[in-house]
């Protein structure tokens, strides 16, 4: 073999080795929410957009190639995006099972055995059994402790009311919807606390996660039941709609309002009396555990667990929440939460705050 041929062979081997080792882990996330370009059309808040932006931060730290496809709250579009995502053959596919749309659809198409992780709204245990029986490669799910946050929010509102008034606690509950696991579980937590407390539940109704629908319904309920002095809301968008209604009715000072999401308060409104959040970070956490699973799938499998992530907005965690609402946690190195790192940390709000202090 001539020297030129030898050199060409060495270069070819080097290029092949480099190509094999430079392949980034590819993850596709079919996001049910709106992209940034469509936020003006959306009255449900930008929660899902923030989830994706924080996932971008984690993907950068972990060397993951992340592709986010936005369904813009359209379940027909979501199905088409799932089909497109499967054609792309990513290493992992992340889905949200809102109203069982995703789990129903993937049973009707060939997923080519792509590993699927469910985020925030997973299939029920019975649905998971059905998916497994049909041969789908469901490797796990990441969901928050929704029942607990429903209870915590109700308790926080009751305590806020009791600290400022001797009047009986009369609550209006504005739910997310009737079918999403997150909404159902938060409502269960609410009802559990109400059943053991001195709260009188005057009325409960769905607001479909919408600020506009919440505004209309809050005005109507307060006309019918002016004694309402607590409003429990399934998310912050609903809570802001309730606050806007209270402002219109000149009742901001007498009614306590709480929500879930840690959303930034609109400039025209006063802050909520209680806001819980943290689940916006679970998309980033999902990438961390996918990264670990990909490295050592037998040692680090992904369970179907709920994660105790919900935390109340306080002065201590306000800096973290402010950065989340700016869609950037560049100062956090998400690789420090990977089990592949020697001194890895548990993924908690407290440890994220410590990362910001470094």
Image: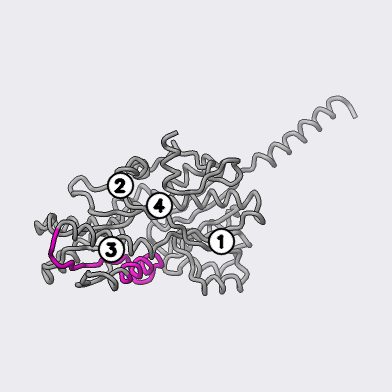
The vertical placement of 226 against 242, above or below, is: below
Mark 4: give few (<14), some (14-19) or many (20+) Cα within 10 Å. many
Q: Residue 282 appears at what percent x and percent y?
A: 45, 53
Query: Which mark is first along the chain, 1 or 3?
Result: 3
How many angstroms separate mark 2 from mark 1 (CA)?
A: 31 Å
Q: Which mark is residue 303?
A: 1
Q: Residue furthest left?
A: 250
For the magenta stretch, what is the residue range? 165-192
* 1 or 4: mark nearer the eye: 1
The vertical placement of 229 against 318, above or below, is: below
Q: Nearer the viewer, residue 244 or 89?
A: 244
Query: Residue drawn at (58%, 48%), measured in percent from left and top?
Result: 291
Mark 1: give few (<14), some (14-19) or many (20+) Cα within 10 Å. few
Query: Which mark is first along the chain, 2 or 3?
Result: 3
Q: Nearer the viewer, residue 56 or 313?
A: 313
CB under 8 Å between discs 4 and 3: no
CB under 8 Å between discs 3 and 1: no
Residue labelled with disc 2: 314
Residue labelled with disc 3: 154
Question: Which quarter of the rendering shows the N terminus?
Answer: top right
Query: Which mark is first along the chain, 1 or 2?
Result: 1
């Amino acid at each position: 073999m001539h020297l030129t041929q030898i050199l060409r062979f060495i270069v070819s081997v080097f290029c092949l080795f480099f190509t094999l080792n430079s392949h980034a882990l590819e993850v596709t996330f079919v996001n049910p929410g709106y992209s940034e370009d469509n936020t003006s059309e959306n009255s449900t808040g930008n929660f899902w957009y923030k989830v994706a932006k924080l996932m971008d931060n984690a993907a950068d730290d972990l060397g993951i190639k992340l592709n986010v496809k936005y369904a813009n709250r359209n379940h027909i579009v979501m199905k088409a995006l799932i089909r497109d995502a499967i054609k792309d053959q990513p290493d992992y596919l992340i889905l949200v099972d809102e109203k069982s749309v995703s789990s129903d659809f993937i049973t009707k198409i060939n997923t080519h055995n792509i590993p699927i992780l469910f985020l925030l709204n997973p299939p029920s245990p019975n649905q998971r059994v059905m998916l497994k029986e049909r041969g789908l490669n469901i490797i796990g799910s990441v969901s928050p402790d929704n029942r607990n946050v429903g209870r915590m929010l109700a308790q926080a509102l009751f305590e806020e009311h009791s600290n400022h008034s001797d009047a009986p606690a009369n609550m209006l509950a504005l739910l997310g919807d009737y079918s999403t696991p997150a909404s159902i579980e938060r409502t269960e937590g609410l009802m559990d606390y109400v059943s053991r407390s001195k709260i009188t539940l005057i009325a409960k109704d769905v607001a479909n996660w919408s600020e506009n629908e919440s505004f209309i319904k809050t005005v109507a309920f307060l006309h019918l039941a002016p004694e309402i002095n607590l409003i429990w809301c399934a998310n912050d968008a609903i809570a802001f709609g309730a606050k806007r209604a209270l402002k219109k009715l000149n009742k901001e000072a007498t009614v306590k309002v709480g929500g879930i999401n840690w959303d930034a308060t609109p400039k025209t409104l006063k802050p909520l009396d209680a806001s819980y959040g943290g689940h916006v970070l679970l998309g980033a956490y999902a990438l961390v555990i996918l990264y670990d699973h990909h490295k050592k799938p037998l040692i680090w499998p992904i369970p179907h667990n709920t994660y105790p992530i919900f935390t109340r907005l306080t002065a201590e965690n306000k800096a973290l929440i402010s950065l989340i609402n700016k869609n950037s946690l560049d100062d956090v190195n998400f690789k420090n939460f990977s089990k592949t790192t020697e001194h890895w940390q548990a993924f908690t709000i407290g440890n994220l705050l410590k990362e910001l202090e470094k």
